[in-house]
Image: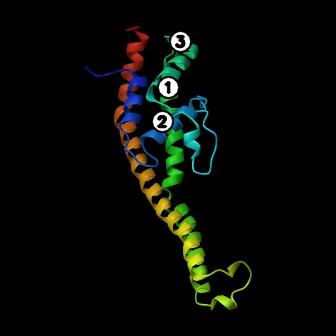
Amino acid sequence: MRKFDPIELLCEILDGLPNGPWGRDAMIRFAAMALGIPQKPTGLPPTPERTLQQQYWDFELSDIRKRLLELVQQTSFPAYPFYEQFLVAGVIQFAKDWLEDQADSDRMETKIGNNKALIEHFEQIKLTPPDARMGDEKMSDDEIDKFLEIPRKAIENMERNRASAESTLDALSTAYRNTFTSDFWSEYLLIRSRGT
């Protein structure tokens, strides 16, 4: 028998997304934001080594499911079950908008280009003898190499994040399109209108 629980199906889609920087866990976080679920602090103090995510508890699928059920119970009427469709589409679109931005190769190329220009600039400085370097550029070759690790790592991360966003966007769009078809919603609304 076909499953007609939009909330459960949405959670299954989120749970089935690929891992990665913009994968399953990030999309659960975005679903929580879309639904207005506040983050709960872990109580750990901020430190340079601790990422922002480590300062808050992770969201779980159960948080998403619970919030969706609360919203449906607060605002949905049995004779007017469109609200669930609106909620599911809203959560998906919120995540897709963010992923499309992160997967945008033109946008990413601009950011990568800025870092590449910085690397080229400092590589040119290395061609100048250290005692002839001026101002902020008065660094040893070793200091320049250490400094250049930052933009090189940034380029690596940007490319990895873009690929992750692209992969997740594809998986999310495909799963949403295949699951929540117009036939699904028509049948779901018919079942709900009959009270079954």
Seen at 48% across and 42% down, the residue is 26
Q: Are marks 2 and 3 in contact (CB under 8 Å)?
A: no
Residue underneath mark 3: 77
- Considering every residue shown, the one lying at the far right of the view is 135
- Considering every residue shown, the one lying at the far top of the view is 195
Seen at 46% across and 56% down, the residue is 162
Residue 156 visible? The answer is yes
Q: Amino acid at mark 3?
A: Phe
The N terminus lies in which quarter of the figure? top left
First in sequence, mark 1 or 3: give its number: 1
Number of numbered tags placed on the structure image: 3
Residue 39, position in %: x, y?
59, 32
In the depicted structure, whether residue 50 falls above or below residue 141: above
Q: Amino acid at mark 1?
A: Asp
First in sequence, mark 2 or 1: give its number: 2
Label 3 Cα crowd, 10 Å radius (few <14 / some 14-19 / many 20+): few
Q: Nearer the viewer, residue 159 or 166?
A: 159
In the depicted structure, whether residue 151 falls above or below residue 79: below
Q: Amino acid at mark 2?
A: Ile
Checking the image for residue 28, the label placed there is: 2
Residue 43, position in %: x, y?
61, 33
Checking the image for residue 63, the label placed there is: 1
Q: Nearer the viewer, mark 2 or mark 3?
A: 2
Classify mark 3: helix, strand or loop. Answer: loop
First in sequence, mark 2 or 3: give its number: 2
Q: Nearer the viewer, mark 1 or mark 3?
A: 1
Seen at 53% across and 22% down, the residue is 67
How far, Cα to Cα, is label 2 from label 3? 27 Å
Q: Are marks 2 and 1 in contact (CB under 8 Å)?
A: yes
Classify mark 2: helix, strand or loop. Answer: helix
Classify mark 1: helix, strand or loop. Answer: helix
